[in-house]
Amino acid sequence: MKKMMTWIMIMVLITGMMLTGCTKSADTGTPDTAEGEEAVKVALVVAGGLGDRSFYDSSNEGIERAKAELGIEARVFECRNDPSLFNDQLVQASQYASVVVVVGFEFYDVVQELALEFPEVNYIYVDNEIEGIDNLTTISYKENEGSFLAGAMAAMLTQENSIEGIQQSKVIGMVGGKDLPVIRNFKAGYEAGAAYIDPDVKVETIYAGDFEDPAKGKESALALYSRGADIVFQVAGKTGEGVFEAASEVGRFAIGVDSDQRYINPDVIVASMIKGVGLSIFESIERIQNGSFEAGKVYHYGIDENGVSLGYGTQDMKEIVTEEMKTKLEEIKGKITSGEIVVPEGK
Amino acid sequence: MKKFITSKDTEYLISLFLSITAALIIGALIMMANGRSPIIGYASLIRGAFGSKYNIATTLAKTVPLILTGLATAISFRSGIYNIGGEGQLYLGAFAAAYVGFTFTTLPGVIGILLAIIAGAIVGALYAFIPALLKVYYKIDEVITTIMLNSVAVLFTDYLVNYPFAANQGKMGGTDMVETSYRLSRLIRLSTLNTSIFMMGFIALIIYYIMQKTSTGYSFKMVGQNATFAKYGGINAKKQMIVAMLISGGLCGVAGVLEVLGTHYRFLQNISPGFAFDGMLVALIVKNNPIGVVFMSIFFGALKTGSIAMENTTSIPSELVLVIQAIIILFIAGEAGFKRIIKDYLMKRNLQQKVGGK
């Protein structure tokens, strides 16, 4: 009995020592951040998590590029889709950096509140529109324009019955992450683009209900393929990985989103609708550095600003979208920028 | 010495303490295996949780929903009816509060807040009432029905928030904001800690009183331990189960209300990252003891806040804390088994000592 008690005491002592001894050693570890005062500190706060090979990773690419080309110092703060962390992570980021890049429409309230608390910090808020706060700049994308191209491309492909895997039925599909304003904006453009090519093409949409769950994406995509869809456009971040899996399982096609995702599986992913999150973030940081940045404004990124586009992967990949289609899509692009085609918005 | 080991509470506390210590040590081993210093890791965790006024406030803010859902679980589990549907009840309660907050905008603040809390509690309780009735009168397993009803509630509020009650400005998947006078005031700058912690404390006291000091609480316990025996003792087991479920649902509803009124000021699509499930873990670890729920919630809140700070400063992923939590639960679940092993060992040694006669 006594031995057991001594054992417990030893354990207590060890943990006690571990917990007290550390405070000192950690203190000596911190000052190295004070070095290199020249570098601008940038924080990236994302609502979800990195590793989606889509939206959030695209934003991180912008930061990485700025690190390499503009010599900034950066740190990433992930919230893992937990609303109770939005405030905490943004506070941490604001205390760390002088430029805080906030990615995710979910931050709408929190970022407005904290921008007033930290007037010396510049906030770049991606994926929403807020005006009237001096140190808060928002970047909004015309997803509908990019999806219009994706829809037009899908509608052309579904009629190419010569390609293996394309069926007679004129059905195309879309898997949305959640039924949300941003996703509905994608959907509106996608449907309009398909209808522009051929009003008979039917567009089926399923919302997976999650941005982080490939299993749900796969299930939704399989349902769409069983309804006769030849091509499924994934607008669901990480969930979309399941869409690609489903496509290769049933031998049909998919369209990627946010980043150029063709490399993931070039046999089934015909193209991607790229949302230039990384580009716009990089440009904003660049503008802040050279002083041409207009704070408190809303920047709109559409086809014209290279904010949305189609990506066909690299040259060595199998060509599924033909040159002919690409020319047609370029033509549509021109018509959108000239205003000849007005793409409807989804709210 | 003998008394020490027979006292049940002390024995439990020791095994809890050992479980936590062992889990922390395993966590340290994992950090070491990844080439990181556990000392620096745990230091930044503790500093992140309690290092400054702001950090303490953040930790406390995290405990509010945990304590409420933990108590909700404790009260239902103790009565032998397993409410796994806390998440759904929380979502509906939160939505009810938001609805009150943006519809009845002319009431004075105190009345508006009270109305929102009552509405949330009623909605949560009613939503728990359905599986309770099914369980008591039709013997349909409440574990399954409550889990299923979670998805129903989450998806239903998803719909409400996107179509009939979508916010007028901004893209975010939420309702309009609640009236300014209904918002609970923040206590510490930058932190989301707000006056809901006092309300939570008051509610927790009431629940503690009901569970430990009243005959209702006693009959809950009787029903939970042996429903047939309780019936012979003159307790209406069915009624007790339903009442426990209503209280449990109401508490989850209130947890949602306080999130809306105190933290977000509106209903958001993903308002809860699984508070009800975390609360359930808390209640399971402390074996449905209301005081234990409070302390364990603070511990969980500290782990959560600390883990984020740890990730930010040392780049040790915050998921490590989930591992630690899981190990604690594993040890507590295996407590009975471990105890037997230790007791057997001690007994053998005792015997040897006596027989060996040294």
Image (spheres, grey):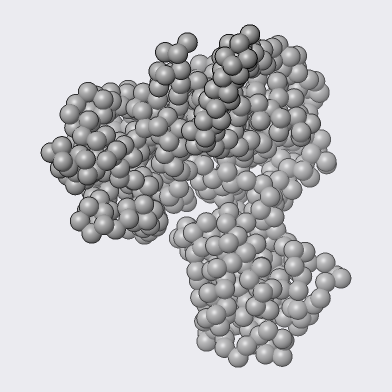
- Vertical relation: A122 (above or below) A202: above
Q: Residue at x 49, y 41 (%)?
A: A83
- Vertical relation: A336 (above or below) A15: below
Q: How many marks?
A: 0
Which one is nearer the viewer's eye here, B317 or A296? B317
Q: Quadrant of residue B201?
A: top left
Which one is nearer the viewer's eye here, B124 or A269? B124
- In the picture as drawn, the residue positioned furthest to the left comes out as B234
Q: Is residue B214 among what the camera can see?
A: yes
Left or right: B229 with respect to A224?
A: left
**The C terminus of chain B - image quarter:** top right
- The percent coordinates of residue B291 (x first, y second) are 36, 23
Q: Residue at x 57, y 88 (%)?
A: A169
Left or right: A65 with respect to B66?
A: right
- The percent coordinates of residue B85 (x first, y second) are 36, 48
Q: Residue at x 80, y 77 (%)?
A: A319
Q: Is residue B65 among what the camera can see?
A: no
- Vertical relation: A306 (above or below) B16: below
Q: Quadrant of residue A135?
A: top right
- The percent coordinates of residue A341 (x first, y second) are 58, 73
Which one is nearer the viewer's eye here, B249 or A344? B249
Which one is nearer the viewer's eye here, B330 or B194? B330
- Vertical relation: B17 (above or below) A13: below
Q: Residue at x 52, y 81 (%)?
A: A227
- In the picture as drawn, the residue positioned furthest to the right comes out as A316
